[in-house]
Image (tube, coloured by chain):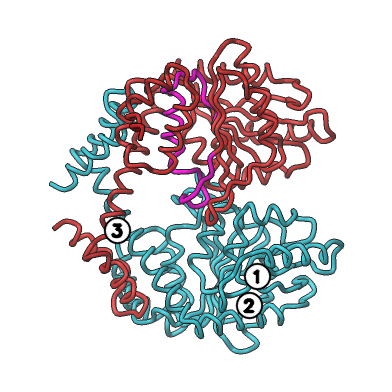
Chain colours: A red, B cyan
Amino acid sequence: MRERPTPAALVERARAGDPRAVARLISLVEDGADELPAIAAALAPHAGTAQIIGLTGAPGVGKSTTTNELVRALRARDQRVGVLAVDPSSPFTGGAILGDRVRMQDHALDPGVYIRSMSSRGHLGGLSAATPQATRVLEGAGCDVVVVETVGVGQAEVEVASLADTTLVLLAPGMGDAIQAVKAGILEIADVFVVNKADRDGADATYRDIQGMIGLGEREPGEWRPQVVRASAVRAEGIDDVVAAIDKHQAWLVEHGELQIRRERRAAAEIEAIALGVLRERIGTLRGGELLPGLAQQVATGATDPYRAAAELLDRLDT
Amino acid sequence: MRERPTPAALVERARAGDPRAVARLISLVEDGADELPAIAAALAPHAGTAQIIGLTGAPGVGKSTTTNELVRALRARDQRVGVLAVDPSSPFTGGAILGDRVRMQDHALDPGVYIRSMSSRGHLGGLSAATPQATRVLEGAGCDVVVVETVGVGQAEVEVASLADTTLVLLAPGMGDAIQAVKAGILEIADVFVVNKADRDGADATYRDIQGMIGLGEREPGEWRPQVVRASAVRAEGIDDVVAAIDKHQAWLVEHGELQIRRERRAAAEIEAIALGVLRERIGTLRGGELLPGLAQQVATGATDPYRAAAELLDRLDT
């Protein structure tokens, strides 16, 4: 029987360009393996070396085609690129329906590109809990840019924004009006809007609508004003403008000290989530796993209330 | 200066049919007031007296019209009804865009109906954290049925299902195909599908599609098979069938002991969320609020990793 490589050895092999080591690390991270702390420790020295780009939008706006073209553009200037395609589909089945990921096979033979699909099992409606760690794996593997692509539904797009340095929101003509954009809260998360399928009817209206909405927003002096870019990813048109908008935002982040702020905020959220995960587990094991169900029964029958029950839980946790 | 009524007095007045007391209680709950534990204690004796119905669906499927007609049907059999319309719009602005809630004014003068809109501020992408407590307020106020209506985007529809005894998912012809339904995970959460706008083109196809998808699902013997009902809420057609499907599901819940299971599961989630909220607050105040940001800074620079940082946080929390 062969010995399993240590997390540190895997990270070393990943840095040396072994795609199987990268795949193995992401799988370990995705499975929530016991090695997670050791992997995180081995990746720590490489923290902050990659630029993280979030890419989100409704189904059908052309996310994977755009990601594909974006990867091509970044490769053209010799950047190593990682892609995490997170599918926040069904939180129950854990099954990722990844559709036309096949288009990404353009880059399948390029050793400077890692592409990984992840489902979001175990994480209701949002990105996988493993996504931040998977991003760190790709960063540790030497990627200069990591693109996190996810379907823009509810929670997921908010989470991708909190994960990314720069968030792209894709729109397409006829996919819903600007009011829907506001409803989904994407005006607050987008650093760059990409009006994709710009050759189609209605693209100008979509462009104007979103510019109008951005104009309505109040902004402090020096605050970032979301860029709006037209593109047609299937025709490989406008991608340079997308890259230019990303670069402009990146420069703004650095200039305003915002890059550091975002990364520390992200780290704080990550630490807190890990700590709360541990606490949740401890809560689940109190009194042999019987305390919480017992209290829940009392709340359901009205013998106690949720606040008193929570207080009892916390008392137990403290002792 | 008048004395503010105690939570117990407010609950008493709410039970006596004072709509202002109900409104005041929900506002307190929504604001996360210090009175929350006292309110919860005063409401506890009434736990489990209301039937909770979740109603969700994509924008434009006719949720508020359907809710309106559902309320009318329940009132016709003399049930007191509460409606919570939760808008999980923008998690950032906290602003609820409630659109055509005006149609609900059909019931504005009916003392047997409480209608309340809530935004979902402070709760990313999902239902308001206050929603379970607001449900309890309406239950405590003597509502026989509480309808929780929310836009079906991502997290929110999953949460409404975890809150409800019976979850209705509204579909409409041409609003997206069955694959989208699966992607959103609604097949797992719906107890009853309502194909609304059943007079429109494509309604039969939507009906067949969803029946087909349900047929594909594996089911244990005795397990609930989601019902599919056609309706046209604007024409007030098919609402009796919707009510019949709800009644059938309610009977199934009781017969299979599932009602108790769901309610205890819900209570457990509520208790856990309250306890974790307290723990999160404690984490935020460690070392004068400086510990987490300090650790985040170290993680961002690679001086430590998120797991080691979380362990340090937990050590501090324990002492």
Quickly name the residue at label 1.
B104
- Residue A197 is a magenta residue: no
Q: Position of residue B34 (x, y in %)?
A: 30, 61
User: Counting other residues with Cα less than 10 Å from the Cα at mark 2, is it few (<14), some (14-19), or many (20 or more)?
Assistant: many
The disc placed on residue A180 is: none
Q: Residue furthest bottom?
A: B77
Please identify the quarter of the rendering in which residue B106 is found: bottom right
Q: In this view, does B315 lie above or below B130?
A: above
Quickly name the residue at label 3.
B275
Residue A64 appears anywhere in the view: yes
Q: Callout 1, which amino acid?
A: Met
At 44% across and 27% down in the image, what residue appears?
A21
Q: Is residue A256 above or below residue B12?
A: above
Quickly name the residue at label 2.
B71
Q: Callout 3, which amino acid?
A: Ala
What element does badge 3 sit on?
helix
Q: Callout 2, which amino acid?
A: Val
User: Counting other residues with Cα less than 10 Å from the Cα at mark 3, is it few (<14), some (14-19), or many (20 or more)?
Assistant: many
Q: Where is residue B197 in the image (x, y as percent from the top left)?
A: 79, 66
Contact between marks 1 and 2 (CB within 8 A): the answer is yes
Question: Could you tell me which chain the residue with mark 3 belongs to?
Answer: B
Task: Say which of B73 and B244 sits in front.
Answer: B244
Counting the numbered discs, the total is 3
What element does badge 1 sit on?
helix
